[in-house]
Image: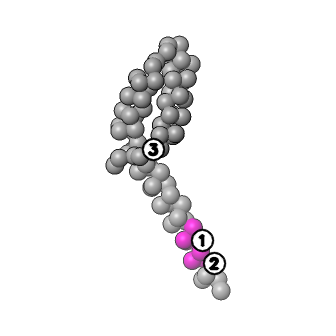
Amino acid sequence: MDLQLSPAQKDGLRRKLIALYMDVFDEEISDFKAGQVLDGFLETLAPAIYNEAVQDMKKFMLNQLEDMEAIYEKR
């Protein structure tokens, strides 16, 4: 899976990563390094997070469908 983010989204995430790095490690990182870290995170973590979100949505939708079936059966 190749997660595609808009340039504005990537820019915002890079800025947040730079701020987070400063807050957590008290260290500055360059925009380039933040971009490399972000790309690595996206490549490594995004598929697992995406798949978990899909499974959560599937459970939610199945529950909604069951609720609709219960309402229909009462009529």
The quarter of the image holding the C terminus is: bottom right
> Which residue corresponds to mark 1?
67
Q: Residue at x 41, y 24 (%)?
A: 32
Three-letter code, disc 2: Ile
Identify which residue, 63 or 28, lies in the foreground: 28
Q: Is residue 4 magenta?
A: no
Residue 47's disc number: none
Tell me the mark number nearer the camera, choosing from 2 and 3.
3
The percent position of residue 1, horizontal first and vertical second, equals: 34, 49
SS for dot 3? loop
Q: Is residue 69 magenta?
A: yes
SS for dot 2? helix
Q: Residue at x 36, y 32 (%)?
A: 40
Q: Residue at x 50, y 27 (%)?
A: 17
| Dominant secondary structure, magenta | helix
In the image, residue 46 above or below residue 62: above
Q: Tell me if mark 2 has few (under 14), some (14-19) or many (20+) residues whose alpha carbon lies within 10 angstroms of its own.
A: few
Highlighted range, magenta: 64-71
In the image, residue 58 above or below residue 18: below
The percent position of residue 5, horizontal first and vertical second, equals: 45, 44
> Which residue corresponds to mark 3?
5
Sequence-wise, which precedes: disc 2 or disc 3?
3
Q: Tell me if mark 3 has few (under 14), some (14-19) or many (20+) residues whose alpha carbon lies within 10 angstroms of its own.
A: few
Q: Residue at x 60, y 71 (%)?
A: 67
Q: Tell me if mark 1 has few (under 14), some (14-19) or many (20+) residues whose alpha carbon lies within 10 angstroms of its own.
A: few
Residue 71's disc number: 2
The answer to whether marks 1 and 2 mark residues whose Cβ atoms lie closer than 8 Å is yes
Query: Rounded to the nearest whole Å, what is the CA distance between mark 2 and mark 3?
Result: 40 Å
Q: Is residue 47 left or right of residue 58?
A: left
